[in-house]
Image: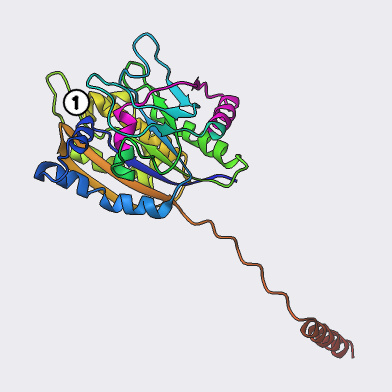
Amino acid sequence: MARIVAGVGPSHVPAIGAALDLGKTEEPYWKRVFSGFEKSQAWMRECKPDVAIVVYNDHASAFSVEMIPTFALGCAAEFPPADEGWGPRPVPVAKGHPALASHIAQSCILDEFDLTICNKMEIDHGMTVPMNLLFGKIEKDGQWPCPVIPLAVNVVMYPPPTGHRCFMLGRAIKKAVESYPEDLRVVIFGTGGLSHQISGPRAGLINSEWDKHFLDNLSGNPQKLVKIPHIDYMREAGAEGIEMVMWLIMRGALDDKVDEVYRFYTVPASNTAVGHIILENKARKTAAKPKAKPKAAIKHKRAAARAKVDRVRA
């Protein structure tokens, strides 16, 4: 069967994509950001997922204020990069996995999660930047290392889904993947955030204490995070901090207990706190069966027991 082996949480700051595309990764400002993902790219090369589920939010590329799905699942065979106003990013077209995506859609919808099914969909920096951070820079005429399944979440227009709803969707995705018959290794991304606000009197807000507390609990106590109301995200992490609920979909898709294998945090990148974490499901060990005792030893033990009974009777 298919199984989710790990979850990753990278920020998706658009300026990171621009720095990568314009060759600025070695500049001092950007080098500290990109160097924090070198271990992650090595880990991903070793992990070798067959499929990546990428939870992200669309920035008026595939959707607009005229059509706002809460959860939209990409079931297409491919997903081209969107033109976000300055032309599409020079990254490869992402290949999909329609069979697994359709299976997830069916399983989750029958579990009463009303997903919007997208058979044609362009993806923007919300998805391509995290893929670059984990897979590395790949030229436009190249290929991403594995097929991807986009899951777009509305965290732009009110009302966004609650953290609890996102976590439970992760649980439904976990169930769906594990019921898929093909043997696949799946990694799930939860993207966005961390704390930031891009407009208004609090523009530029970053709350490192909040961010680090969130990462601590994401690893060890996610049930504490699912109870956080929208207003707390807005007040503590900025207007765009609500993106952090998407990390809870990733966490919900993992086992209750996970191993945190890597964490990285830096501020700022553009006007955003960059957070990153890698969580692996603990190895599922099958209890070893007790070794069968030799027949001669069993006979000897039975004979000794009978002799003891005879002595008692005598």
Q: Position of residue 265 (x, y in %)?
A: 22, 45
What's the image's color scheme? rainbow
In the figure, is residue 32 to the left or right of 3? left
Dot 1 alpha-carbon crowd within 10 angstroms: few under 14, some 14 to 19, many 20 or more: many
Front one among 1 and 95: 95
**Element on which disc 1 rests:** loop
Quarter of the image where the C terminus is located: bottom right
Residue, disc 1: 197
Boundaries of the magenta span: 101-130
Name the kind of residue labelled 1 in the image: Gln
Q: Position of residue 171 (x, y in %)?
A: 50, 36
Residue depicted at x 55% and y 60%: 285
The answer, for residue 227, to whether it is visible in the render is no
Q: Position of residue 19 (x, y in %)?
A: 18, 36
In the figure, is residue 311 to the left or right of 94? right
**Is residue 118 rendered magenta in the image?**
yes
The answer, for residue 251, to whether it is visible in the render is yes
